[in-house]
Amino acid sequence: MSGRVLVLGGTGEARRLAAALVAAGIDVLSSLAGRVADPVLPEGDVRVGGFGGADGLADWLATHRPRAVVDATHPFAARITASAAAAAARHGTPLLRLQRPGWTPGPGDRWTYVGSLTDAAAAVRDAGTVFLTTGRQGVGAFAALPGRVLVRAVDPPDEPLPAGAVLLLARGPFTVDEEAALMREHGVDVVVTKDSGGSMTEAKLVAARQLGLPVVLVRRPPLPDGVEVVTTVEEALHWITR
Ligand code: NAP
């Protein structure tokens, strides 16, 4: 067994955990899917690309024998999270899920939770101008929307866009003022987002609250059974070093 920790990444938490491990003198290898053309790289060693499903990751664990795996992927990255749970269980590799809490509505929020992107598309079909901030993956679920849709993503989506789409390529974080100005400029009537949680992408929710706009949030996929979960980088660091 190596002393190395494998961090499944692609999130701000994963980058902060990698930096904390480097600072603590712990050998870390961060793994990225390779989806974003120009990713912000974590400190320490980095590998890029899929493992080949649960079997591929299990083979990787058998070969490289990390002392632990921290799955710090995005709350909506359900496939890699399922692979990590299955592969780590097969090898008895300690596995921790680091996942930030979801958002909670405050006074004045007009939030509706839905179970999927398809349900979100149905919920906003006749809602006027839609601001879609669910990321490039799965955007095809909104392809049949009849109205104006402001689609914001880091990289151009591969999936079909609605006929009335306005594509905005931008990488956050954005301030509340920037988000509010954008919503005003485009006459946004409703915001659609995944319940990603965290402060990095929260500004759009605050801006929607200020403007009195409704928000449709897609609920998170469930976590695999039996995996220990923490919500902060500090807890993850404690779990690794204890
Ligand atoms: P996903 O659906 O769970 O994963 C699809 C496939 O991509 C996985 O089966 C795996 O391929 C590979 N993969 C995903 N994360 C990986 C990682 N960290 N290292 C190596 N391979 C990885 O995930 P996704 O929703 O496409 O997200 C891809 C990446 O973007 C994740 O790392 C996630 O943290 C990040 N991200 C996702 C979102 C989102 O909304 N989904 C938002 C922000 C960032 P194999 O099966 O071949 O191993």
Image (cartoon, rainbow, N blue to C red):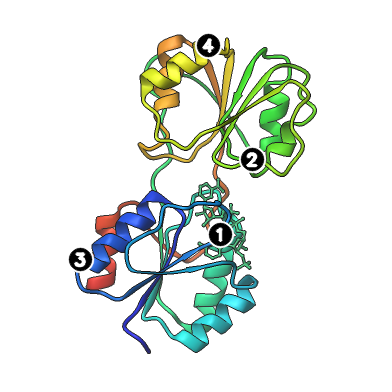
Q: Quadrant of residue 117?
A: top right
Q: Are marks 1 and 3 in contact (CB under 8 Å)?
A: no
Q: Where is mark 3, residue-wise?
A: 23
Q: Position of residue 46 (x, y in %)?
A: 42, 68
Task: For ligand 1, tell me if the residue under mark 1 lies within 8 Å.
Answer: yes
Tell which of 13 and 182 is nearer to you.
182
Cα gap from disc 2 to disc 3, whole angstroms: 35 Å
Q: Is residue 102 above or below residue 216?
A: below
Q: Is residue 57 above or below residue 220?
A: below
Cα gap from disc 1 to disc 4, whole angstroms: 33 Å
Q: Position of residue 196 (x, y in %)?
A: 48, 41
The structure residue drawn at horizontal position 74% and vertical position 32%, both measured from the top left corner, is 161
Give neighbour class at mark 1: few <14, some 14-19, many 20+ (Cα, 10 Å).
few
Cα gap from disc 2 to disc 4, whole angstroms: 21 Å
Q: Is residue 89 left or right of residue 52?
A: left
Tell which of 3 and 185 is nearer to you.
185
Q: Are marks 2 and 3 in contact (CB under 8 Å)?
A: no
Residue extending farthest to the left is 24
Q: Position of residue 168 (x, y in %)?
A: 58, 29
**Badge nearest the viewer, 3 or 4:** 4
Q: Where is mark 1, residue-wise?
A: 34
Q: Where is mark 2, residue-wise?
A: 156
The structure residue drawn at horizontal position 75% and vertical position 27%, both measured from the top left corner, is 162
Along the polypeptide, which appears first: circle 3 or circle 4? 3
Along the polypeptide, which appears first: circle 1 or circle 3? 3
Q: Is residue 94 above or below residue 48?
A: below
Element marked by disc 2: loop
The structure residue drawn at horizontal position 32% and vertical position 63%, both measured from the top left corner, is 43
Cα gap from disc 3 to disc 4, whole angstroms: 44 Å
Query: What number is the disc on residue 185?
Result: 4
